[in-house]
Image (cartoon, rainbow, N blue to C red):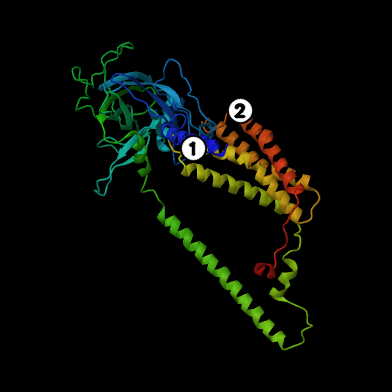
Amino acid sequence: MDRRRSLWLTVIFISLLSSAHSFYLPGVAPRNFQTGDPLNIKVNKLSSTKTQLPYDYYFLKYCRPTKIVNSAENLGEVLRGDRIENSVYSFQMRQEQPCQVICKQKLNAESAKNFKEMIDDEYRVNMILDNLPVAVLRQRRDGIKSITYEHGFRVGFKGNYAGSKEEKYFINNHLSFRVMYHKDPETDTARIVGFEVTPNSINHEYKEWDEKNPQVTTCNEKTKDLVPGSSVPQEVDADKDVVFTYDVSFEGSDVKWASRWDTYLLMNDDQIHWFSIINSLMIVLFLSGMVAMIMMRTLYRDIANYNQLETQDEAQEETGWKLVHGDVFRVPTNSGLLCVYVGTGVQIFGMTLVTMIFALLGFLSPSNRGGLMTAMVLLWVFMGLLAGYSSARFYKMFKGTEWKRITLKTAFMFPGILFAIFFVLNALIWEEHSSGALPFGTMLALVCLWFGISVPLVFVGSYLGYKIPSHWGHPSFWSCFH
């Protein structure tokens, strides 16, 4: 029987090893494209590092498809403010598409105001192709040749015409896409490994607009390339007609599909605020030195007093640091609140530790969009078991008897405070029509996770922690040597 059992275990182990090579995370498996296969571009939120408020792509008056379809989003994507939707941009794999006209939009006063505000706040447009976000190639000003990228492209920019001092707003209405692919040497299939865009602002001209077959004179009729003289930018103002165009080029690449996210790790490498970091470190070291000096002076003064008392009557009352031994194991005034703090801290520590383990194993890679936020929320909910257990064990060490009250505080105090602050902020963001505002269904789902999973787990952990016999005891100096 033992030999048969060991044989079965060996077979199972070998099968697990062999299946490991075919394991892919959901939604991040590679896709092979034939020549001419359709490539649908999805649009994401408008983001800015200046305001931190994301907006839906169609908040601005961009070209819209006939029907806007929202892609399936997980909890993390909703919390991040992502709104992934379909768009009017459509490519064919490995087929050049020069100067494609999408639509013409007439800006009214409100839409022009929205564009100007977005340009002032340095908002960027995010797009997705084959789960790969669009990036803008950034040029280094110091002359060093290095390939770095920026997430998304700017909505527009501010500038003035030659000979004019008045500053005006211009929109990036022409997008030059470049899709990099890695071709399989044995078959004709290819995988997308890069998605770049170069935004331009061009004031397109046309003789007569035809909705079914739009033509602009700023493109060459034969080659459909942009005319070299068409460099006048498109101004943003009320009652202005804006023509949106794009072109697509494809380029082979030696980068393999498994390494296509490596270029995104080099983004924004010069935005590290070294001055702020060094300033914070100096302040921390200065304050720590001051506290250490005060403690050392107090300790030296007490030691000098103790040395003087040794030559006097030993029956005198103890003072200074010698009083610590009588207070170190005394139950504090707010012992219940301390237990709640400990339980919440253990919950946060457990969530952080398991999240880091998942990240090291590759389950929270950037290709799994929203996975980090989803994992943190779910782990916080399930770590309620540890929160209840640790708070109850700590409360039992203080000889407490009202463990149910401590459990209620652990389950509702800190989550309640956070949810109240989050609810107020969400209402303010909703008033700004930002995509970062959570829908009612998501808020209801978070409440169900809190009351349906986290609270029961806190009670189960508290029951186990208080009812199981405890072997905890107060440590002492002599216990360290036994």
In-front residue for pair 324/167: 324
The answer to which of 179 and 61 lies nearer the viewer is 179
In the rendered structure, which disc, 1 or 2, sits on the residue that comes first in sequence?
A: 1
Q: How crowded is mark 2: few (under 14 residues within 10 Å), some or many (20 or more)?
A: few
Q: Residue 388 carries which label?
A: none
User: Could you tell me the amino acid type at mark 1?
Assistant: Thr
Quadrant where the N terminus is found in the figure = top right
Tell me what residue is drawn at x 44 percent, y 32 percent: 19
For the residue marked with disc 2, what is the amino acid? Phe
Q: How crowded is mark 1: few (under 14 residues within 10 Å), some or many (20 or more)?
A: few
Q: Which is nearer the eye, 254 or 374?
A: 254
Location of residue 446 with respect to 61 vertically, above or below: below
Asked if one can make out residue 482 in the rendered structure from this viewpoint, the answer is: yes
User: Residue 74 appears at what percent x and percent y?
Assistant: 52, 30
Q: Disc 1 vs disc 2: Cβ atoms closer than 8 Å? A: no
Q: In this view, does 204 lie to the left or right of 222?
A: right
- Which quarter of the figure has residue 237? top left
Q: In this view, does 410 lie above or below 477?
A: above
Q: Quadrant of the C terminus?
A: bottom right
Q: Which marked residue is nearer to the observer: mark 1 or mark 2? A: 1
Q: Name the residue under label 2.
A: 440
Residue ID for mark 1:
10
The picture quadrant where one finds residue 296 is bottom right
Task: Say which residue appears at 50% left-offset and 65% top-offset.
Answer: 285
